[in-house]
Amino acid sequence: MNIEQKIRQAISLRASGDAEQARECWLSLLEEEPGNAEIWYQTAWTHDALGLEREAVPYYEEAIRLGLGEESLAGALLGLGSTLRTLGEYGRASEVLEQGLRTFPERREFRVFYAMVLYNLGRHAQAMELLLAEIADTSGDDGIRGYAKAIRFYADKLDEVWE
């Protein structure tokens, strides 16, 4: 089996719910292709899928360091930022997610995950502002769409009182 077939097999195993066997495949692939950033990224993702967040971090970091294509880089930055947040490493998570925001300003998922880490950092108003803007901008709900202008207006004024 060539490397591309092994990669497809490992992805298929993870997708079908056999993340442990997929993990074994990824670790074996890393031995064969230690300079392949995509394998590092997929290995990180699989560790996350298994609830092995702490173990996933160095795989994400190495994948990013080695250089990934655009789609995988977005996934790796989001995965690393989210994983660091779940580990309570809020400062590092914030830095990674801010990098994702700068690199992929059009990708709304970064704003949502960044809002989560802002909450963890005690920056509740900024977190709510980001989330409310995302709700106003992306909701398909008729009620939300009807009030989108008001939601956007109040998003950064939650502590203001009008008399």
Image (spheres, rainbow, N blue to C red):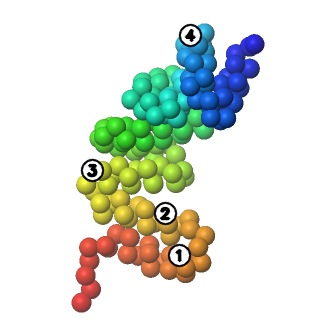
Q: Position of residue 51 (x, y in %)?
A: 46, 34
Asked if one can make out residue 61 in the rendered structure from this viewpoint, the answer is no
N-terminal of the pair, mark 2 or mark 4, is 4
Please tell me whether mark 1 sits on a helix, a strand or a loop.
helix
Identify residue type, mark 1.
Ile
Label at residue 134? 2
N-terminal of the pair, mark 3 or mark 4, is 4
**Quadrant location of the C terminus in the rendered image:** bottom left
N-terminal of the pair, mark 2 or mark 3, is 3
Is 124 located above or below residue 1 in the figure? below
Say few, some or many: other residues with alpha carbon within 10 Å of mark 1 (under 14 / 14 to 19 / 20 or more): some
Q: Which residue position is annotated with label 3?
A: 121
Give the spatial CA distance, label 3 vs label 4.
Answer: 38 Å
Please tell me whether mark 2 sits on a helix, a strand or a loop.
helix
Q: Position of residue 28 (x, y in %)?
A: 59, 13
Q: Which residue position is annotated with label 1?
A: 144
Please tell me whether mark 3 sits on a helix, a strand or a loop.
loop
